[in-house]
Image (cartoon, grey):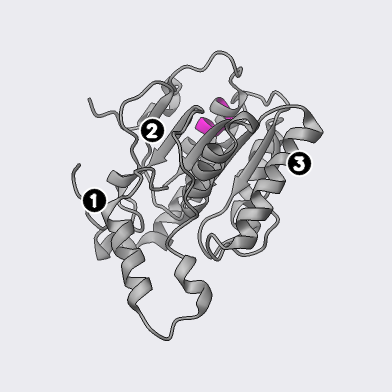
Amino acid sequence: MTTARLPSPARLVTEGPRAGLDFSALLATWPLLATARRGDGHPVLVLPGLLTGDPATFVLRNALRLLGHNVSGWSLGTNRGGTGRVVRELRSRVAELHQTTGRRVSLVGWSLGGMYAQQLARATPGSIRGIITLGSPVVRGAGWLQAASRIVDRTPHLPAAAASLPRPWAEAGPLRVPATSVYSRADGIVPWSSCTYEDRPRRENIEVRGSHLGLAYNPAVLWLLADRLGMPESTWRPFQPPLALRPFFPRRD
């Protein structure tokens, strides 16, 4: 396994302005996005990144709602890491959505939220329809993540909750549901190479152009989400972007 290289300082410091460009691209392409696949009524739970909450996914969730998708926020305030409360509440939320609708739940997770999505899918695959992660490490035991965990463990005088920040909880077992990982090679926060699955059935890695902070506003990401979430459950197939949006999806063979 190759070692994931941390993003360059230049990409990190330009994340904010580049996220603004992603939002501008969304406004410019909205007429095309309005023609994306409609929802089929099954529940979709959106999980935010570290130190963000539902306000950060407001645009994403409402864009999908306008397309008829049955989307919910996580309703747990600021995401401060995989604490015991977060674990209990997310498991309960997935069970509630599954039971009240009678349908399996799709999970959309941004950054750390995508790591939660993976663990929820491992814990209760019968309740999960599929997961889509945005700029999230999907390689279990990635070297850079283990190194970050060790740094936190060995640093004195940190608040007690800090030990959970780099790591979600760990669930045993394979990932048995369809999974799509969305990543950008220009990501200034998470090493993009840690965001790609090995080649397996019902796994796909989709590259987009843009920043990490702009993934929830990126028109290519929103189109992909609408397409994946609206696809009939029993007929999963790899994603193919429409001709007009192909420049937003780099292809590397």
Q: Position of residue 161 (x, y in %)?
A: 53, 73
Residue under label 2? 206
Q: Is residue 13 visible?
A: no
Q: Which residue matches tag 3?
A: 96
Taken as a whole, is the magenta stretch helix, strand or loop?
helix
Q: Amino acid at mark 2?
A: Ile
SS category of the residue bearing label 3 = helix
* 3 vs 1, front mark: 3
Kind of residue at disc 1: Ala
Distance from the alpha carbon under mark 3 to that under mark 2 = 30 Å
Where disc 2 sits, the SS reads strand
Residue pointed to by mark 1: 4
- The C terminus lies in which quarter of the figure? top left
Residue type at mark 3?
A: Glu
Residue range of the region highlighted in magenta in the rendering: 223-227
Upstream in the sequence, badge 3 or badge 2? 3
Tell me the CA gap for discs 2 and 1.
18 Å
Quarter of the image holding residue 239?
Answer: top left
Say which label, 3 or 1, has the lower sequence index. 1
Q: How far across and down, in percent of the image, does residue 97 sit?
A: 74, 38
Say few, some or many: other residues with alpha carbon within 10 Å of mark 1 (under 14 / 14 to 19 / 20 or more).
some
Q: Which circle, 3 or 2, is nearer the viewer?
A: 3
View extreme (top): residue: 235
Residue found at x 18% / y 44%:
2
